[in-house]
Amino acid sequence: MLKAMLSEAWLAMGANRLRTALTMLGMVIGVGAVVIMMAIGQGAQYAVQQTISTMGSNLFIVLSGSFTTAGVRSGSAGAPTLNVADGAAIAELDGVSNVAPTHQGTRQLVYGSQNWSSQVIGTTPEYLDARAWNIVNGAGFGDSDVRSATRVALIGKTVAQNLFGDDDPVGKTMRIQQNPFMVIGVLGSKGQNLDGRDQDDTVIIPLSTAQRKVFGTPFLGSVRMIMVQADSAENMPRVMDSVTSLLRQRHRLREGMPDDFFMRNLSAAAESEAETTRTMSILLGAIASISLLVGGIGIMNIMLVSVTERTREIGIRMAIGARQKDILTQFLLEAVMISFAGCLLGLLLGLAIALGINAFTGMVVVISGSAALVAFAVAATVGIFFGWYPARKAAQLDPIEALRYQ
Amino acid sequence: MAEPVIRVVGLGKSYATAAGLFPALKGVDLEVRPGEYIAIMGPSGSGKSTFMNLLGCLDTPSIGDYYLAGENVAHMAKDALAILRNRTLGFVFQGFNLLPRMSLQDNVALPLVYAGADKESRRAAARELLDKVGLGKYAESLPNRISGGQQQRVAIARALVNKPRLILADEPTGNLDSHTSEEIMRLFGELNAEGITIVLVTHEPDIAAHAKRQVKFLDGQIVSDHLTGQAA
C-alpha cells in the first residue's frame, strides 16, 4: 500500500512540474546553506586543530618587558628581564609540563658553497616536547649539551633542502656566524604557522651555545622569551596566574608596580582566527534557517492549494473506501517527497558551492556524512511539520461535500 | 427468505439551516433483498439524495437504524464506514468520477489499494473487470482518451472490483445521451442477472423502467413502492 501511495505521490508531483520545482526552491536554498555552513564551520575547526597541533597545545610565552628605574622606562629593547633561573622556577609550578627559555634571531648559515638565512632558536630540549616536534633523522640534543654549550644543531626541512640539497645533513658541519656546528638531526615538517611563516625554516641549537657563540649577548643567562606549556587547556588560566605571581615575586616588584614581562596565549590566537570563520558560518546558519522556514511555508501553501484543487479527488477516494489516515498519509507523503527532493538538490548544490569555495579561496572545507544526515533530518522535519496541516485538512473533508465540489 | 442486504427502520436526517432544523428525510422504512434491482425516484428536494448518502455510508442519520448486510451502521465511526464503503459497497456516480491522472486500470484497481491487496492481484482483478465491460484494450489509457459512456463503464468496473454486496448508482445516465444510457442500463441489467443487488437513483421514468422495483420519494417520505414489469 505504501508503495502504491509513493508512486501516486510521485505522479502528483509530476502533474505540475513547474509548481513543484518552485515549491522546492526554498528547500534547495535552505539545505544548500546548511551544507555550506557545516562544510565551512567544520573546515574552520579542522584548520584550527591543525594549527594548534603543529604549534603545540596549551602553550603560552612569557616575553621580556620593560622595567622602570627611577622613572625611566627601558622599553622592550633594553636588557632582557627574564633569565634561565626564572624558567627553572616556572618549571617547578603545578600544572606546568614543559618550560623552554629561548633566544632567537636570524642568522646566515653556510655549508660548502651554499648559504641560507634562517631563524636560529637557542633553547633547551623541552622546547621540542612543548611543541610536539619530532626528529625524523638523527637525534636531538640533551641537557648536557646545554650545560657545556656544544656546537650541535637541529635543522628544519627547508634548511636541509636549501643547504644540503639531496645530501644527508646528519653528521655534516655547517657554519653559523663563522662557528662550525655539527648537524645532529633533521626536524619533522610543520608547515606554515598562523602568520604564514614557514616553520620548517628553522635551526635549533642549545641555548648556551646560542648566547655565547651566535648572538653574543652581553646579558648571559638572560632571555627575552620563555615558552611554557600547561598540562591541560583547563589549567591554562591558573598556570598563567601563578607564573605572573611567581615572576613578580622573583623580580621583586612591589604592589602597584607594573609587570616587567608580558604573556601571550598562543592557543588563543589560533582560536580567535577560528572565531571569524565561525561567525560566518553562524550567519550562514541564520540564512539556512530562514530559507528553510520560508521553504516550509511554501510547501504548506502549495499543499493547501493542492488540497483545494483536488477536493473532488479526495471525495472520490473517500467514497471508494479511503480512511482518514489514508488521505492524511497520501498528502503528508507528497509534502515529504517534495521536501526530500528539494533536500537532495540542495545537498548537491551545497556540495558544489562548498567545493567551489575551496577551489577559489583555498578556505578549508570539510564535507562529512553528518552534514547530509542533518540535511535529510531537516527535510523530513520540514516536510512533516508543514505538510501536516494541509494533509489533516484533506483528511477531515466531508465526503459528500467533497464529491459535490466542482 | 434471505437476509436483507439493506434494512432501514425509521431513518431520518435533519440539517441545520438559517431558518432552523430542516428535516430532509422523515422516518423512512425500506428493505432490500439480495438480487433486487431498485430505482429510487422523486423530484429534487424529495430526500432521495439524502437517502442515497445514508445508504452509501457517506453520512450518518439523525434518527433511526440502518442495517447493512445485517450490521447496524447508523452510529459507526468514520473509519469503520470507510471500510464498509470499501468492502461492501460499490459506487457509480453521475459524473463518472474517475481520477484523471491515473490509467483506467489503476482507476479500477484503486479500491483494492485501500483494501490492502498486493499489486499483482490488483492488476489481475482490474484487467478482468475491464474486459468484462469491454474496455480491456484501453487499460493503460487515461480517462480523457475515452468517451463518457466508456468512462461510466470503467466506473462500473471500479464499483465491482471489491465484489460488493450492493451497487449504489446515483443518476448514472444523467450525463449521457439516450443511446449510451441504454447501453449502460443494459450493463446494469446484465449485472443484476448475475445476482448483483443494485440501487439506482434517477428522475427519468424510462431509466427507472429498467429496474424491477420502483420506490418514489416526496417531501422526505416514501410515497409509493411497487414492482415493475421487469420483475416478472
Image (cartoon, coloured by chain):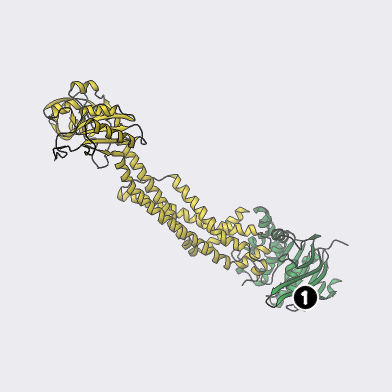
Write down the chain letter for disc 1.
B
Q: Chain B takes which shade in the image?
A: green
A288 left or right of A223 in image? right
Location of the N terminus of chain B (image quadrant):
bottom right
Q: Which residue of the protein is positioned furthest toward the right in this rendering?
A: B1
Farthest residue, direction front: A255
Q: Can residue A111 be seen by looking at this rendering? A: no
Q: Nearer the viewer, residue A247 or A64?
A: A247
Report the label total. 1
Q: Is A208 rendered above or below residue A344?
A: above
Can you tell which quarter of the image residue B122 is in?
Answer: bottom right
Residue A216: quadrant of the picture = top left
**SS label for mark 1:** loop
Q: Position of residue A404 (x, y in %)?
A: 65, 71
Q: Is residue A195 left or right of residue B196?
A: left
Q: Amino acid at mark 1?
A: Gly
The vertical placement of A248 against A368, above or below, is above
Task: Specify whether A274 is left or right of A369.
Answer: left
Residue A97 visible in image: yes
User: In the displayed structure, would residue A369 be above or below residue B166?
Assistant: above
| Residue wearing tag 1 | B220
If the image is split into quadrants, where does the C terminus of chain B sit? bottom right
Task: Name the foreground residue: A87 vs A197.
Answer: A87
Q: Nearer the viewer, residue A105 or A391?
A: A105
User: What tint does the image give chain A?
Assistant: yellow
Task: Name the spot of residue A330 as percent of width and height, x first.
Answer: 59, 58
Is A79 situated above or below B83? above
Q: Looking at the picture, how far across and down is residue A86, in whole percent?
A: 23, 29
Where is residue A341 drawn, in percent x and y?
A: 49, 55
In the figure, is residue A249 to the left or right of B129?
left
Quick one: label 1, few (<14), some, or many (20+) residues within 10 Å? many
